[in-house]
Image (spheres, rainbow, N blue to C red):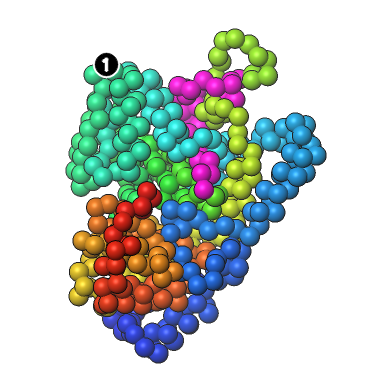
Amino acid sequence: MEFPLERAHLPSTGSALFETVAALDAADPLARYRERFFLPDGITYLDGNSLGALPRATPARVQAVMQEEWGTGLIRSWNSADWIGAPQRVGGKIARIVGAQPHEVVVADSTSVNLSKLIMAVLAAAPHRTTVLSEPGNFPTDLYMVETALATVGGGRRLQLAEREQLVQQITDDTALVLLTHVHYKTADVYDMQALTAAAHAKGALVLWDLSHSVGAVPLALNTCNADLAVGCGYKFLNGGPGAPAFLFVAERHHQTLVSPLGGWMGHARPFAFVDAYEPAPGIARFLCGTPPILSLAALESGVDIHLEVDMQVVSRKAQALAALFMELVSARCGAYGVSLVGPPSGAPRGSHVSFRHPEGYAIMQALIARGVIGDFRAPDIMRFGLTPLYLRFADVVQAVNTLEDVLRTESWRASEFQVRQAVT
């Protein structure tokens, strides 16, 4: 299914625009999935890239785990309901979405903790290499985890930052690890995973990909790209709920050489032998640590199951079409108010969100939220709009741009209540 948008002839207002988006929504092969999510009336939700909407199946699934498995099964459910196997079971499902083997992905901890585990594992395995390479403006937790890992390891190890245009040239025989976010959290720029991984391997370095804004949003093929390591978030496009556990991927070829620095009992080869000495489990299980959060895993699995029903190529094509419509309308109707696009232009590879810059971006976003158009703000001046193809309609994009234009035209964002910075932006 294609989503044609003839940019040269796209009307920016009026009945012709309405007819265009109505036709796109009527022909959308993903339209039926909108009913699979709770979406409040009067809300245009453009923040699924930060917190996915609630799948309708999730409350019943979590309730069943609480009442039946926990309430009736009690501790027996570790075996009878296979709670103990949940991290691998859900990880195996995510593996199908990211293009990996089931035994290469496990659900565990948070994205930050998983980053730390994999960074430390690589540094321990490559003591003769002193550099971790990343880019300025990478997601902060990625850089923070490198900094703390390097401070812990010591020995002259260092973090090197290079702009993405120069990054490949900065990979040397001294590079232990290249750490990058596949889809940039602000701009939606996308790295060529296969090409960059090959460039790192040519110098003997490994690559750790942060897939938090990729999984469930763009097609992924970790094994085809010969990827080494990856982490990803469960609460964005996978719709696992606030604070949902994350996942990590370790290519099978690294299972025997990389060891988690957090030797928790769930990562032990024989956790219920209760021996004193730590022995890493074989395979991906060695990257587990503490007891898995069963209720959160149940919610995450419910969201993941929806993605297993869809073709990610179709999801990606719809995301590109939503972005093209959004960018075209904002350019035509909001450019005069100082709004400018951040990130790839229309037609270029991008993730599933669109960002615009404005000096008063925070206040404008608060005014939009007050009127039911929910996006988010990323300092210093970026308004970010998530385009989640499973439940977003082309008509929603038009509604969002209509509201944005009105907020800018009337300068309603100048109201005092929109000037106060909240704790979460």
Front one among 318 and 136: 136
- Give the residue at the far top of this rendering: 276
**Membership of 264 in magenta stretch:** yes
- Residue 31, horizontal then vertical, whole percent: 55, 71
Q: Residue furthest bottom?
A: 15
* Amino acid, disc 1: Gly
**Which residue corresponds to the image point at 29% horizontal and 18% vertical from the top-left?**
154
Residue drawn at 30 percent across, 22 percent down:
151
* 267, 243: nearer the viewer: 243
Q: Bounds of the magenta span?
A: 242-269
Q: Is residue 283 visible?
A: no
Horizontal arrangement in the rendering, residue 218 relative to residue 77 (left or right): left
Image quarter of residue 116? top left
- Dot 1 falls on a residue whose secondary structure is loop
Q: Please provide percent x and percent y for residue 294.
A: 64, 38
Image position of 54 with respect to 120: above or below = below
* Relative to 127, 38 lies left or right: right
Q: Quadrant of residue 205?
A: top left
